[in-house]
Amino acid sequence: MKEAHVIVDRDFVIGDTDPRLFGAFVEHLGRCVYGGIYEPGHPTADERGFRGDVLALVRELAPTIIRYPGGNFVSGYNWEDGVGPVEKRPRRLDLAWMSTEPNTFGTNEFMDWCRAADVEPMLAVNLGTRGPDDARRLLEYCNFPGGTELSDLRRAHGWEKPHGVKFWCLGNEMDGPWQMEMKTATEYGRIATEAAKLMKWIDPTIELAACGSSSRNMPTFGSWEDTVLEHCFDHVEFISLHTYLNNYADDTPSFLASADLMDSFIEEVVAIADAVAARRRSTKRIMLSFDEWNVWYRTRRKNEGRTKLGWPVAPPILEEVYDMQDALAFGGACLSLLNHADRVKSACLAQLVNAIAPIMTETGGPAWRQSIFYPFRDMSRFGRGRVLQTRVSSPVYTTVYYDPRGTSELSFPMPDVPYLKLAVVDNLDEGTVTLFALNRNLTETLTVETQVRGFGALSLGEAHELHHGDLKATNTKDRPDEIKPASLEGVEITGDRVRVRLAPASWNVIRLSARGN
Ligand code: AHR
């Protein structure tokens, strides 16, 4: 039987998790909005058309901040189309997803939905087909109290009080050729800087995220961040990162290891941001907004939205059905985020409902949890507090990273991947220490002994695992609970040592009570 050893110490801290680390994303994409969060006429919908069953699952999932309205969609979006009397709103072609956008849901409806879901809104501005002046106008519409044309327009539309949106994304994936009006790093850096200036002159309390690379695999990765931050450094608080893990190669050990590249990605972006600071002799630290992350591959290369004829409204695109191994890779990504809580101060699971999402719905029918729902729920519920450094000694395996574009020259071996990946959070307010542990060994149980120093004697609060004998098992409308957490038995605690046996291919949460210390 394989065995791993871990040491954590109350005094050795990575950083506090920011509540915004547990965010998600709602884009006008497929059935994420229409038929997802918003479906007038659905049996559970309220008078605003908000699906009650979806809201209940969102509250259970516990995201803290939601990014909106895109994504690729935002690079062609006219925010004015989505406000004012619904019957006067235009239908438009959406070139991001080759759909027709009815605009019956827009910024104000999103603000109301956020209030109903008890989440903070995060808005992205269009720096593709539009620019800094439009961003300025949207900010004035949303955040200015009144007495100007745009703020009074919001009031006339029925929203008397300003929305007070604090977190804004300066465009989306502007380095990508798939983006409407993509930019070079210099073009984007200039435009983002000017947008930031105008926006902060209206509301200096806002926080801004500049677009980083749309993935670590982009040929411009690194130089993009460097150039963009050379322009924006004094004007933004965040640089964004995006990652979608994939298993195109149908190689599960490699898939599970690939989550570790998120750690590298984060550390590389931190290094670049700090190098820009160093050149200026600045003590300012740019924080990271990992504002799109998930597993996504089955519905990605098909690019269904672009190939379907007929410009449908809310087509069922990107409806990835997640299996057990996806939940494990996803759990690995959660651990990467937690373990960089000192610099990743915001992150958004992409997305929330139907389109690459933890929550699935049938239009007119029920809603259910996908496999990835559970690691996210665990992370959000139990990840609040101080993330502790971990010293891990685990058996390892060797695998391969496959470049998703299929180029062998960009594939590389990944040696010494620990079977155990974990994060430990001291939930200060509750007197609880939570261990999140992933066993990446597909066939063998992993015994883990953790010394949790500095908390005195520990006792077991609660422990559960996510595990299924079939890594390809999924939750469906007819079998919504095929994958669900079960109690983790056999946790042994002796003084400050915790001994636990992790099932092969499992995600585990162990909550220790450290009260009275
Ligand atoms: O989340 C789906 C898409 O992935 C987003 O619209 C885009 O930003 C990214 O490429």
Image (cartoon, helix red, strand yellow):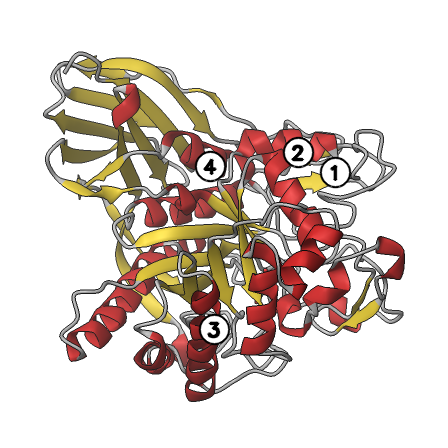
Estimate the spatial distance between the alpha carbons at disc 3 and disc 2, rounded to whole Å.
35 Å
Give the quarter of the image for residue 118. top right
Point 72% across, 30% down: residue: 53
Residue 14 left/right relative to 119: left
Task: Find numbered disc 3 in the image and state the secondary structure of the residue it sits on.
Answer: helix
Q: Is residue 416 above or below residue 504?
A: below
Circle 2 sits on which residue? 55
Nearer-the-camera pick, 465 or 89: 89
Q: Which is more foreground, mark 1 or mark 4?
A: 1
User: Which amino acid is tagged 4?
Assistant: Pro
Circle 3 sits on which residue? 198
Q: Residues within 10 Å of mark 2 (few under 14, many from 20)?
A: many
Circle 4 sits on which residue? 375
Nearer-the-camera pick, 49 or 31: 49
Q: Is residue 166 above or below residue 477?
A: below
Nearer-the-camera pick, 503 or 26: 26
Q: Are marks 2 and 1 in contact (CB under 8 Å)?
A: yes
User: Which amino acid is tagged 2?
Assistant: Leu
Q: Position of residue 220 (x, y in %)?
A: 40, 82
Q: Which is more foreground, mark 2 or mark 4?
A: 2
Point 60% across, 77% down: residue: 179
Estimate the spatial distance between the alpha carbons at disc 2 and disc 1, rounded to whole Å.
8 Å
Q: Position of residue 105 (x, y in %)?
A: 76, 52
**Disc with the residue nearer the chain's start (1 vs 4):** 1
Estimate the spatial distance between the alpha carbons at disc 4 and disc 3, rounded to whole Å.
39 Å
